[in-house]
Amino acid sequence: MRVALVTGSSRGLGAEIARRLAGDGFAVAVNDFSGGEAGRAVARAIRDGGGVADVFTADVTDADAAAGLVAAVERGLGPIDVLVLNATGPQPAVPLAAVAWDDHLAQLEFFVKSPVLLARAVLPGMRGRGHGRIVHVDSEVADIPPPGMSAYVTAKGGQIALARAWARELAPDGITVNCVAPGFIPVERHDDGAGEERGAYLATVPAGRLGTPADVAHAVAFFASEDAAFITGQRVVVDGGRGLFR
């Protein structure tokens, strides 16, 4: 059975990606930062549906923890065939005049450092087997930067460049590297004014509806599949066509 590690998969987009890959026949390593009930619930739901999954707690921005995570997954489920880089942290809105270098570092930890640490851990096995799939989850903000999010946007731009560089270098090893960029995807209900943002989004989306976590998971699943064996260095924006208006 093929094995997929999905970082940051205890909730939201990551949880949906984990469930989709399990449905496609992968044994899924659910990664949870805190070791709380959320990650266990995702793995349990997959097993209750007849799939294979276990939860692995690790801070993927820490070098030792990232290496330990990969080793634990390989001991528990087997060699990692698919690495989905989805983990994220807080994304506070900070006006440009107030953005400090530490704010940039906080975003780079998740979107550049974490992928580097995990790739270093999975590459020996993937190269040895001559096969692997790495999928980055980036964001539409790289194309449509919102005010107050310069540190987040910059880190996402770095993640995209990282993925393209990896794709070029790893193609001879049979390893593909691609990106999926979600647009505005509400993952839960909020009573904090988000309705106005959703309305504005719908006004500029040809698809005429909000995106769902499943829309993103479909794209990730394609890049993880054998159907995408001849596709690398690419980026799919899952935004219902919103980017057509930028």
Image (cartoon, grey):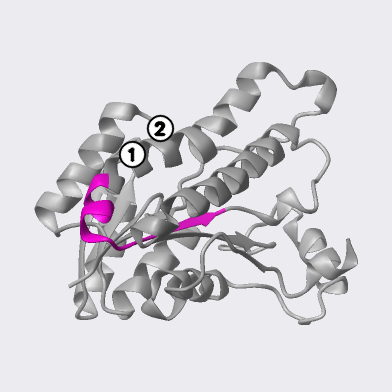
Choose the circle earlier in sequence order: 1 or 2. 2
Most extreme residue toward the left, as rendered? 75
Query: In which quarter of the view is residue 121 placed?
Result: top left
Taking the spot 33% from the left edge, 47% from the top edge, the residue there is 32
Q: Which residues are magenta?
A: 124-137
Where residue 212 appears, as percent x and y from the top left, is 59, 72
Report the residue that reaches farthest toward the front: 172
Apparent side of residue 107 relative to residue 208 in the rendered image (left or right): left
Name the residue carrying label 1: 120
| Residue at the image position 38 percent from the left and 50 percent from the top | 7
Q: Which mark is residue 173?
A: none
Amino acid marked by disc 2: Thr
Residue at the spot of label 2: 61
Pick the front one: 56 or 218:
218
Give x and y (percent) for residue 181.
Answer: 62, 60
Compared to 220, does 112 lie above or below?
above
